[in-house]
Image (cartoon, coloured by chain):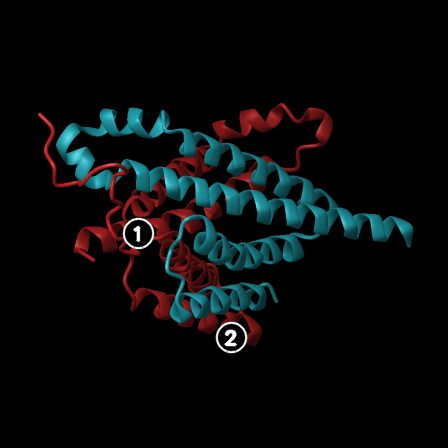
Amino acid sequence: MIRHAISNLNGWLAILAIVLSSCAGDVLLSRGMKQIGDLGALRRKRGLIFVFLLVSRNRYFLLGVGCMAFSFYSLLFGLSWNDVSLVGPAAASLTFVANAIAARFFLHERVDRRRWAAALFVAAGVVLMAF
Amino acid sequence: MTLRKYLVMAGVSVFAPVGDSLLSYGMKQVGNIPIRRISELLLAIANPWIALGVLFLLAFFASYMTALSWADLTYVLPASSLGYILLALIARFALHENISVMRWLGIVLVSAGVGFVTTGPELTRKPPRRRSGGDVAVQRP
């Protein structure tokens, strides 16, 4: 009984960690890429190696990749405590909603009704696809 | 949205599920790795399916970064969830897995979400920021 509760708690803690870190990672990566500008146009103008160096030296990009790595290990931790059918969809769908909120406040994106609907529909769809 | 941008979005949606499927297939061949032999995880890359899966995931990351360089995060993420639908269709028609009614309903919801977001603009246009202490138009020698 207690063992089951601990396993559940650890599973949900892992889900929280995945959602927060992957959301932070996405926001940081997005900000870094916006700072650099259109990668396709840059590659045509300055070449692939230039773009590669530019991206790999961007502070937001490096922090974002760090967050993504943390999120990956949280996922592995979560999978060791709970079922993939709970952790996977729960983390993925909550991340969609958290990202919409974070993009609104940290990236100042215009999250209109259409985008809210998209985030909620995709989140609900991901949960249903787990059944 | 130009054709090139649609191709990049297609890359984001296609490379991730294909890469994940390849990793899953490869790891089934490698078998369970107990925690005290965790270093064997590094050798898993020698499996050709896993190596191919990693290549696909690298391609996914490159197209994801490219998409984020010209589109909003709240546009790229729902649009890239087309991959979930693709994965379900591969499972149904290539791997002949059974797909429950709930899962079909999930596919419909995800498709609706993708439809919603892709009919709108891909980037929030921000008014150009004026530099403090001077007019932008003034040219300095």
**Which percent across, then down, holds residue A92?**
55, 55
Image location (x, y in percent) of residue A120: 50, 67
Chain for numbered disc 1? B
Residue at 42% over, 48% down: B16
Q: Which residue is rendered at x = 66% and y = 27% of the image?
A: B38
Name the amino acid, label 2: Leu
Where's residue B69, x and y in %? 30, 43
**Viewport quadrant of the C terminus of chain A:** bottom right
Quick check: A47 above or below A94? Answer: above
Colour that chain B carries in the picture: red
Report whether residue A72 is seen. yes
Name the residue rendered at 51%, 39% in the picture.
B26
Whether residues under marks 1 and 2 lie with C-beta atoms below 8 angstroms apart, the answer is no
Name the disc covering residue B105, or none.
Answer: 2
- Please name the color used to draw chain A: cyan
What label sits on residue B71 in the rendered view?
Answer: 1
SS at circle 2: helix
**Element class at badge 1:** loop
Q: Residues within 10 Å of mark 1 (few under 14, many from 20)?
A: many
Residue A114 vs B74, above or below: the answer is below
Residue B56 sits in which quadrant?
top left
Front-most of residues B10 and A46: A46
Identify which amino acid the numbered label 1 is placed on. Ala
On-image quarter of the N terminus of chain A:
bottom right
Closest to the camera, between mark 1 and mark 2, is 1
Q: Identify the mark nearer the N-term, 1 or 2.
A: 1
Give A65 or A85, whichever is nearer the viewer: A65
Q: Quadrant of residue B37?
A: top right
- Tell me which chain the residue with mark 2 is part of: B
